[in-house]
Image (cartoon, grey):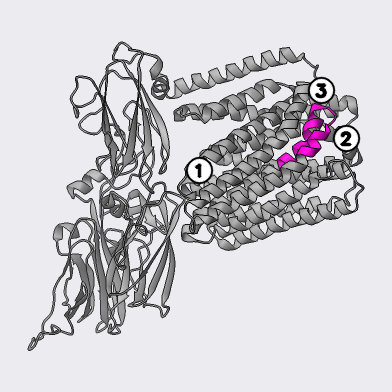
Amino acid sequence: MDIAKASSEGLDRTDRLTRRAWHTRAALPMVVWMVLTVVLVSAHRGIPRQVWLMVHFVTLGIVSNAIVVWSNHFADAVLRSHRQGHRREVWQLVMLNSALTLLSVGVVGQWALPVWAGVIALVGMATTGIVGIARQARHSLPARFAQVVAWYQCASGCLIVGAVLGGLMAVPFGRWSDAILASHLAFNVLGWVGLTIWGTLCTLWPTMLRTKAPERVERAARAALPLMLIGVIVTGVSPLLHPVAPVWWRIVGALGVVAYLTGVLTQADPMLHAWRGKRATTFPVLSAGAGQIWLLGWLCWVLWRWMASPTPAVLVEHLRGTVPVLLVGFLLQVLLGALSYLVPVVLGGGPAMVRGTSRSFERGAVARWAVVNLCLALFMLPISSVWKVTTSLAAFIALSGFLVVGWQAWRVRTGARPAPEDAPRAHRMRRGLAWALVWVLLAASLAAVVDPVSFRSQFAGTRGTESGVAETGRTRTVDVVARNMTFTPDVITVDPGDRLVIRLTNGDEGMIHDLVMASGATSGRLSPGESANVDLGVVGQTTDGWCSVAGHRQMGMTLQVQTSGASAGQPSSSAHDGHAGADPGAVTPSLDLTKEYSSGWKPRDAALAPASTQKVHKATLRVTDAVMEVAPGVKQTMWTFNGSAPGPVLRGRIGDVFEITLVNDGGMGHGIDFHAGALAPDKPMRTIAPGESLVYRFTAKRAGIWMYHCSTMPMTQHIANGMYGAVVIDPPDLPTVDKEYLLVQGEQYYGADADGAPGVADMGKIMAEKPDSVVFNGFPAQYDKSPLTARVGERVRFWVLDAGPNRAWAFHIVGTQFDSVWFEGGWRLRNGTTPGVAGATSGGSQTLGMLASQGGFVETSFPEVGHYALVNHQMVDAERGAHGIVQVR
């Protein structure tokens, strides 16, 4: 039987129920997730959790809802059977949307329980589909294309695996985390979405072409499924081999992609043959066909990247850049193409009405299709950010046109407006392509108006420079490598009038770099191993470039382009007083200790809890960027461990094992260095890129208060910007005291606000050793406002650590003396005597002096009621905020 006729009969049998299902079951959740996606896109700030929501609102919210409805419908059509009250579809939709809601709550709140509840709901939804379709097939008559249901069952099985892997991502797995993420993407994108779409297209494609499906389509579908399923499994498993087989995982993964690509080409061949016979140019055919082409190109690109990526983390970082291709180029185009064909049939009303509503969906079809694909192609090129915004806007408007024509089709169905006339194909093509060209030109005009400098730099190679130099017509391409805080080469000399293209490669491991030129041309942020071209256009004068990642430029990561005859290092026209690129409107905050902290501010609790009895201490340190009030009226963008600066305190005993998982949720590369452990720093202290994680494991073999801090260069800036903390390892004979406090001294170097956001630690002030404030536990003078407490006669121990990065600390408490001092590995004074010194008389200590990263503890008893000041007796630092109060009752 003709598949088009079978599909139509299946639609006729369930016309009213399916119509109701579309409006109430699929349309409502799809619209809700679509609206939420638009809101997130409008407010997008590059936050990892926000990116997660946008991607999953499209894949799970929009696409998966459509997959559930139409996979059930096509199962009915090819099996020629009725569903019993649509219960399976209803339950699947309920579980799917409940799962996405739970997952969103869990990801935003970073709670594992909702995440796993959502995973269980997804597994239940997929299992319901597998079992329900199997029962339906068992009770149906033999039918042509019945093997299509096997595609849906295999896709649901892939979703089960992908959902479980997604749940595991909520648990820190150290070096396995990136591999799990890559595997999760393979099973969900290639399996759940890819198999479902290609399984549907083997029946829907001939139907959209309104032609009889040839036998070769059926044979191709049978041959393609095992190839693509094997490809999904092999590709999905290969990243998990990386921790144990760092070389073979790439080869295995590439073989999996090849198998999947072979299956796609096997099925695409008869589909292309069917199209050649019809030359159809309707929107469903154009949109779904373009989606398949984007997928083929993406698979070829993935094959190349899979072989070139040294780790799954690098692969995932590259895949993030192709999200528009998958979401817009493949998923949304295939989905909108299918809906443009199916919705008129669902609306029903007889053959004449279906033709009328179908013509409504053809309004502006060629223009909408051409704008989306042309803008997407431009977006994926190394164009300026302004161009990317305007092309995205044009594509978004074109995609939104589906809602407009859908509303017009509904009005045609209800009789509110007449059906449009059918225009000749050649006329529609010419007019549509002309309108698409107009849209792209409007996008270019908008880019020129919004940011003329970036727009000019985009086309600088086609015109002379503003200096009036004559163009030579030559183009020079120079390879530059960013590594170890330098560009190599860091000086490029070209002849005046030559066009220069810099091919920048990030040669560092774990660190992100970029290149920003004074003209506005930029490479964008590059992950390790990634490359990009920076087109400077025609060069007529000396110009400067630098890495814009915080602190990198100050560490010497600069580059200069000069013309022949100029000397290296001469000032460029864009540099003024050594502050090229600075924001003239930036505001640098200053310290005023007479002000009050804002409402809601709370001091950090300095009380130190005793060490636990456990022998293995497991903790997760999550790097985040957080805007914090660091002084009265002063806000800065801090780089934090677990949202605080300094980070959390760890405490244990000699012989304890510490297993720390570092997760980088920040916007740049970070690492960690624990002074409490002794091990080669090469791997555990390496810098990891955003989204990556590592496990740092050490055994505490010596007592002391040890510093930990970010190990990424420039370390001075990372430490000054909040990335430090303390590990306390108790001496074996540590006596019991009434109270213990811990104070960590740090320094603050307030940076100017940039792009409307609070600044980060100013590298110039750091290098000049001119802090704005010196603080205990992250805030200046916080224990003046909220004093520490003790009682007369209580024995109090103060653990102290100087985290620096630059200033020394002379710890002193006004009005009391220390009778016990433990410093850097041993007792210097114990109960008034010096250990190991024969005949030592009773004595005391007034000050414990520490250089940066040194620490220890002192013990004292307060003689009477009063307020005792604890200070850094380098008084200039005390007046910068390094002081507090002990209130004794």
The percent coordinates of residue 67 (x first, y second) are 73, 44
Main SS, magenta region, reads helix
At label 1, which amino acid type do we have? Met
Q: Is residue 409 above or below residue 505?
A: above
**Front label number (3 vs 1):** 1
The secondary structure type at the circle numbered 1 is helix
**Judging from the image, what secondary structure is the residue with disc 3 in?**
loop
**In the rendering, at what x and y percent does residue 708 appear?**
31, 62
Residues at marks 3 and 1 touching, judged by CB atoms closer than 8 Å = no
Q: Which residue is mark 1?
A: 307
Foreground residue among 179 and 217: 217
Q: Which residues are magenta?
A: 196-220
Q: Earlier in the sequence, mark 2 or mark 3?
A: 2
Based on the displayed image, in which of its 4 quarters is residue 662 positioned? bottom left
Q: Quadrant of residue 501?
A: top left
- How far from the left and from the top, in percent, is residue 347? 84, 34
Instruction: Check disc 2 and report the residue beneath it.
Output: 8
Q: CA distance from mark 2 to mark 3?
A: 25 Å
At horizontal 77% and vertical 24% (from top left) the residue drawn is 360
Residue 397: % across, % down = 61, 28
Earlier residue among tags 3 and 1: 1
Q: Residues within 10 Å of mark 3 (few under 14, many from 20)?
A: few
Query: Is residue 804 positioned above or below 152 on the image?
Result: below
Res. 417 mark: 3
Q: Residue at coordinates 84% horizontally, 50% vertically from top-left? A: 86
Residues at marks 1 and 2, CA–CA distance in whole angstroms: 45 Å
